[in-house]
Amino acid sequence: MLRRLAASLIVLATLVAGLAAGSATADTLPLPPSLVDGASDAGAVLLVEAEAREAYFPLAANFLTQKNQAFCGVASMVMILNALRIPAPEVPEYLPYRTFTQDNVLNASTEAIVPQATILKQGMTLDELGAVFAVQPVAVTVRHAADSSLDAFRKEARDALATRGRFVVVNYLRKAMGQQTGGHFSPLAAYDAETDRFLILDVARYKYPPVWVTASDLFGAMNTADSDNDGRTRGYLLIAGKSG
């Protein structure tokens, strides 16, 4: 039993550290004391002990860095669609293989919801990302923090992360968590009940590593007004395959 646990710790620590590999580590920003670096020894232990981590492995296998500073929502969506194995478009350079990329996930249907030119200028709002997700064969639930609560968020996110084929994307204000600086999207990958922390797989890998954040701090960062969304609060998306 102890040998299996030790082996799991090594595997998980390697995987978490791998998420930070290739990043511009000399230029990444320091973390505030309230956050735990997911690629640290302490972060790896949290992952091993997490009660809900079904989302971690499929997301880690499909992890990517947003291709520009406005594509956090797009990158999060690509990771989850590939993790769900949704039928994907052709990619000329990968033929005959298919996969979602940040270059092909936006199409004529998403353009009618929010133009790519707008995304490149200011990103997406929670409602826009939810609508763009819904173009694909997935079930999407949009939760604004003001319409939820810390307890409700914790339960919904924990239950999703403990269930294969279900995912959570959080939309939060970085500065409310002690980071720099504006609104951001990234997927959650795990929940540790003992410390009441969620693991965010930050798609801005050039800026921050994956981090463990307390549920209360994360909810507080989501419960902030988004001026680009008529002042509505940020929040989270619950995503599953249509059969999930």
Image (cartoon, helix red, strand yellow):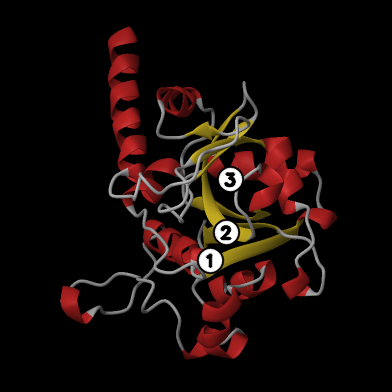
Give left or right: position of 111 versus 92: right
Pick whichever of labels 1 and 2 is earlier in the sequence: 1
Task: State the residue at coordinates (58%, 84%).
Answer: 118
| Circle number at residue 73 | 1
Q: CA distance from mark 3 to mark 2?
A: 17 Å
Query: The N terminus appears in which quarter of the rendering?
Result: top left
Q: Residues within 10 Å of mark 1 (few under 14, many from 20)?
A: many
Q: CA distance from mark 1 to mark 2?
A: 5 Å
Farthest residue to the top: give it: 2
In the image, residue 42 above or below residue 22: above
Closer to us: 41 or 63: 41
* Horizontal and vertical percent position of residue 137: 49, 72
Q: Are marks 1 and 2 in contact (CB under 8 Å)?
A: yes
Pick whichever of labels 3 and 2 is earlier in the sequence: 3
| Circle number at residue 160 | 3
Q: Residues within 10 Å of mark 2 (few under 14, many from 20)?
A: many
Residue indicated by mark 2: 185
Pick whichever of labels 3 and 1 is earlier in the sequence: 1
Q: Are marks 3 and 1 in contact (CB under 8 Å)?
A: no
Closer to us: 215 or 240: 215
Q: Is residue 22 visible?
A: yes
* Horizontal and vertical percent position of residue 179: 61, 47
Q: Amino acid at mark 1?
A: Gly
In the image, residue 228 above or below residue 158: below
Q: Residues within 10 Å of mark 3 (few under 14, many from 20)?
A: many
Query: Which label sits in the foreground, 3 or 2?
Result: 2
